[in-house]
Image (cartoon, coloured by chain):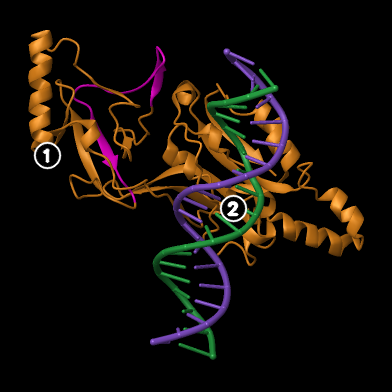
Chain colours: A orange, B green, C purple
Amino acid sequence: MELERGIFTHFVLITIFSACVYCSDCVWNKDKDFPQYPPLILDSSFEFVLPVEEDGNRVVRVAAGETVTLACPGDEIENLHQVEAEARCLENGLLAIENSEWDMASLGCGDDVKEVIFRDQGACGAGNIGILHEIGFEILSAEKFKKVLRVCFDPSLETTLYTEHLIHGANIAAKDIDSSRPSFKSSTGFFSVSMSTVYSQSSQLELMIKLLGDEDLAHQIINTHKQFYFAKGHMSPDADFVLMANQDATYYYINALPQWQAFNNGNWKVGGGAFLAHGWSYSSS
DNA sequence: ACCACAGGTCGGTCTAACAG
DNA sequence: CTGTTAGACCGACCTGTGGT
């Protein structure tokens, strides 16, 4: 089907333009030409190929002749039945994978790509009390790990000291927006308590009563209606990332610290979000 | 005043791992 | 084998902001 569609698309383009003047690069509209579960696209420098905003459209470009890696870590490219593929952009706007030609819409993963934690990447923090962990994607064909963010975690206090991530300011206007959000993941080996339990308002209230020995005072400090409770404050925030896959990779408890919800849903939300800088961001506790 | 949106919580369900 | 528990996932809901 894909090959046929490719030939058909090529035929139509040739028919319309007679020569393929306007289709020397592979250009896709992120909202129209992409599959529901897009693969990661990495260029020859092992960098994410990201959308840019052009005239109100979110556009992804790969130059004609350029080879990129398509990857569905944790799943596979549905029509190819393989996790990764090397694809070369043809002048007809299609992608050549081995001996066949494909359009981008046919190269989706079976499900959302799945990030992993690449653990114990050295010591960090003052006095080297922390251990670095990287959250990102395993790219098997390159035998490399594509880092999305880095976490310096103190295993003795079971808390995060700082995180680092790269902000792609030139692409942030074209980022993926989806109001549905994944749940926070604990992963194994980081915490000796249930993080979902300790972050619950009921256990925060319980702890405050225990610490203060005064139920009324505890209710003043932990108060749902006034947003007086500790939420999971992202260190490397969802909103700093362009791709949905990278946004979802921030939903780990090791990338969060307790933050007053009044601040989280107030000052932070108003001030945060639209970063236009480009560079590494460093969030410390 | 009303509504859409974004960043949150919470509880239910499913599944896999593990202990008895 | 069975019961328990933790983690993952999902939908319903809450709140403040900003646009109409």
Q: Residue at x 53, y 55 (%)?
A: A185
Q: Give the distance between the C-alpha atoms of the residues marked 2 and 1, in whole angstroms.
A: 41 Å
Q: Where residue A223 sits in the image (x, y, percent)?
A: 80, 48
Q: Is residue A234 visible?
A: no
Q: Residue at x 32, y 38 (%)?
A: A36
Which picture quadrant has residue A6? Answer: top left
Whether residue A86 is situated above or below residue A9 in the rendered picture: below
Disc 1 marks a residue whose amino acid type is Glu
Residue range (magenta): A51-73
Residue C16 image position (x, y, % from top left): 72, 31
Residue at which label 2 appears: A253
Q: Is residue C10 above or below residue A89?
A: below
User: Residue at the location (53% across, 50% down)?
Assistant: A183
Q: Is residue C6 or residue A144 the one in the foreground?
A: C6
Does residue A132 appear in this view?
yes
Local secondary structure at mark 1? loop
Q: Which secondary structure class fits the magenta region best?
A: strand
Residue A67, compared with residue A80, is above or below; it is: above
The magenta stretch spans residue A67: yes
Question: What is the quadrant of the C terminus of chain A in the image?
Answer: top right
Of the 4 image quadrants, the one containing the N terminus of chain A is: top left
- The crowding category of the residue bearing disc 2, from other C-alpha atoms within 10 Å (few below 14, some 14 to 19, many at least 20), is many
In magenta segment, residue A23:
no
Give the mark toward the camera: 2 or 1.
Answer: 2
Residue A4 relative to residue A64: left or right: left
Q: Nearer the viewer, residue A65 or A8?
A: A8
Chain under callout 1 = A
Query: In the image, is A12 to the left or to the right of A47?
Result: left
Residue holding disc 1: A98
Q: Judge left or right: residue A136 versus residue B4.
A: left
Question: The disc numbered 2 marks a residue on which chain?
Answer: A
The residue sitting at 13% across, 35% down in the picture is A2
